[in-house]
């Protein structure tokens, strides 16, 4: 979803875009719905987009995508599910850790002047986030004493799940290639990213999953009590941040990026908005908390605001409406 938004953003600007994708996302989540294939086919309408079916772990595929010379790589390829990483930890590591290193190494040897943007995650902080004091309210948890998580949050000595660990390996290698080899690199440690053409599953992409379930009157499982809070960021906004870094004079950076304190929502509050918009009263089943599920994650965006002059432009309510409108127009895709 994020990769397709980035591709479309640059295609609309008239740039030449190359996509490398192995189209395995649906398989990862055991779904017969062709989620990533939809985005793949959607982008075929742009004559300046070249699509290569291949794997970031395969040398020949990566070299074919890099070609003779490119200006930037936005590395969105990944195994994105926390529960999935616990079921297939070796595959998770292979995709997220080795896949990232493989792209970095080929880029270094072939075109080390290109910018490398890595889509990292707030899960690199693991359960250290839970050390921030919180207060329980009627419909949500809230941080006490801080507005959000900054880049200074410790990462070690805590639980991560295999997903958080494998993404952190890619994060570290991205930083090392910037410092050791002088490449222009950036890690964007992202919070909850959502947008059009998002095919959510229960294990990943909960925003879209809730929207889809509300439209189809499907039951919802809530892991925990539903008061966990995330700051939400629309895909268009995060792609703008990538572009600002690529065009900047900054050499190598790490940014936490999300909707920030102005765009927070709990699961229960999100479901209330869906009920308000659809009139559907979805059945909910409460289940045990998932491992390393942060009760609150809110991004401190002050660094990315200051260094890139970036701020989110699409509010939570507006973003939910945009996603719902797209899902309604394409309801048959989810049946």
Image (cartoon, rainbow, N blue to C red):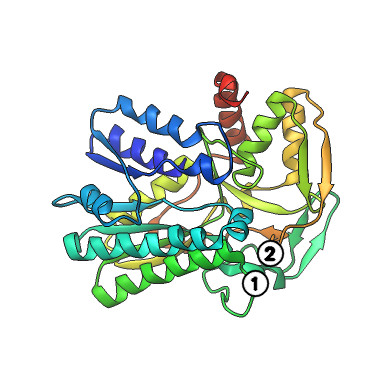
In the rendered view, tell whether residue 61 sits above or below residue 96.
above
Task: Mark 1: give few (<14), some (14-19) or many (20+) Cα within 10 Å.
Answer: some
Residue at image coords 64%, 55%:
83
Q: Position of residue 28 (x, y in %)?
A: 53, 46
Residue at image coords 59%, 41%:
30
The residue carrying mark 1 is: 159
Q: Are discs 2 and 1 less than 8 Å apart at CB?
A: yes
Mark 2 element type:
loop
Task: Tell me: 150 left or right of 255.
Answer: right
Numbered circle sitting on residue 292: 2
Q: Position of residue 115 (x, y in %)?
A: 27, 58
Task: Tell me: 92 left or right of 320.
Answer: left
In the rendered view, tell whether residue 220 sits above or below residue 152.
above
* N-terminal-most mark, 2 or 1: 1
| Residue found at the very far bottom of the displayed protein | 157
Q: Position of residue 17 (x, y in %)?
A: 26, 40
Q: Quadrant of the C terminus?
A: top right
In the rendered view, tell whether residue 99 sits above or below residue 192.
below
Residue at image coords 58%, 54%:
260
Numbered circle sitting on residue 143: none
Can residue 74 be spotted in the picture?
Answer: yes
Q: Position of residue 281 (x, y in %)?
A: 82, 28
Task: Tell me: 3 left or right of 69.
Answer: right
């Amino acid at each position: 979803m994020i990769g397709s938004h980035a591709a479309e953003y640059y295609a609309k600007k008239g740039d030449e875009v190359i996509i490398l994708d192995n189209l395995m996302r649906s398989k990862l989540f055991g779904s017969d719905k062709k989620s990533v294939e939809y985005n793949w086919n959607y982008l075929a309408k742009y004559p300046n987009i070249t699509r290569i079916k291949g794997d970031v772990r395969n040398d020949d595929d990566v070299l074919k995508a890099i070609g003779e010379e490119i200006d930037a790589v936005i590395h969105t390829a990944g195994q994105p599910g926390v529960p999935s990483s616990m079921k297939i930890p070796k595959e998770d590591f292979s995709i997220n850790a080795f896949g990232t290193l493989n792209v970095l190494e080929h880029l270094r040897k072939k075109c080390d002047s290109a910018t490398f943007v890595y889509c990292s995650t707030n899960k690199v902080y693991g359960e250290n986030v839970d050390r921030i004091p919180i207060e329980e309210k009627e419909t949500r948890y809230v941080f006490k004493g801080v507005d959000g998580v900054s880049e200074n949050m410790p990462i070690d000595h805590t639980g991560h799940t295999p997903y958080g660990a494998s993404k952190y390996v890619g994060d570290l290698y991205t930083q090392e290639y910037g410092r050791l080899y002088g490449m222009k690199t950036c890690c964007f440690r992202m919070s909850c990213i959502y947008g059009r053409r998002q095919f959510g599953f229960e294990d990943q992409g909960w925003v879209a999953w809730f929207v889809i379930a509300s439209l189809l009157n499907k039951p919802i499982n809530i892991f925990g009590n539903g008061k966990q809070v995330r700051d939400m960021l629309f895909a268009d906004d995060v792609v703008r941040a990538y572009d600002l870094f690529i065009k900047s004079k900054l050499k190598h950076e790490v940014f936490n990026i999300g909707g920030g304190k102005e765009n927070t929502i709990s699961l229960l509050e999100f479901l209330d908005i869906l009920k308000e918009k659809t009139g559907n009263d979805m059945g909910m089943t409460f289940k045990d908390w998932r491992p390393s599920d942060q009760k609150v994650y809110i991004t401190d965006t002050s660094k990315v605001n200051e260094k890139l002059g970036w701020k989110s432009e699409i509010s939570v309510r507006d973003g939910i409406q945009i996603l719902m409108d797209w899902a309604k127009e394409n309801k048959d895709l989810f049946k």
